[in-house]
């Protein structure tokens, strides 16, 4: 097994995770965005850093959450 295996992220989970992360970190992200040294070309790196948090969840957990989202949307 490799030391740093690449973990897969379910696309729907990744979108949900990024949405929740940006909501939870909104105040901090605003401070970063309005900092004098923040440049527009930093946005992709910031987004990538936020997306990396999604890989901490197992594929099974991701599927479970996505399935729950589907059920909640039908209610």
Image: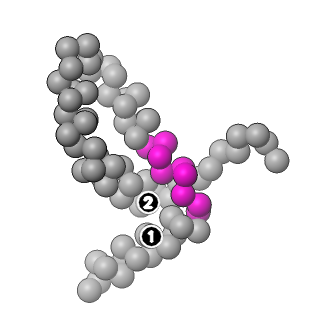
Q: Residue at x 25, y 35 (%)?
A: 29
Is residue 35 shown left or right of residue 18?
Answer: left
Q: CA distance from mark 1 to mark 2?
A: 7 Å
Magenta-highlighted residues: 51-59
Give the class, few, some or many, for how many residues have Cα within 10 Å of label 2's Cα (few <14, many ≥20).
many
Of marks 1 and 2, which one's residue comes earlier in the chain?
A: 2
**53 magenta-colored:** yes
| Disc on res. 65 | 1
Looking at the image, residue 6 lies above or below residue 29: below
Which residue is outermost to the top?
37
Task: For the residues labelled 1 and 2, say whether their Cβ atoms are less than 8 Å apart.
Answer: yes
Residue 48 image-quadrant placement: top left
Q: Indicate the position of residue 73 as horizontal and vertical percent values.
A: 28, 78
Q: Quadrant of the C terminus?
A: bottom left
Is residue 75 shown left or right of residue 9?
Answer: left
Task: Look at mark 2 in the image and give the residue it sits on.
Answer: 13
């Amino acid at each position: 097994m490799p030391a740093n295996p690449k973990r897969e992220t379910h696309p729907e989970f990744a979108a949900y995770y990024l949405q929740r992360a940006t909501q939870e970190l909104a105040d901090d992200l605003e401070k970063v965005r309005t900092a004098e040294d923040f440049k527009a070309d930093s946005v992709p790196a910031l987004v990538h850093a936020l997306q990396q948090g999604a890989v901490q969840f197992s594929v099974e957990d991701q599927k479970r959450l996505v399935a729950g989202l589907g059920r909640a949307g039908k209610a």
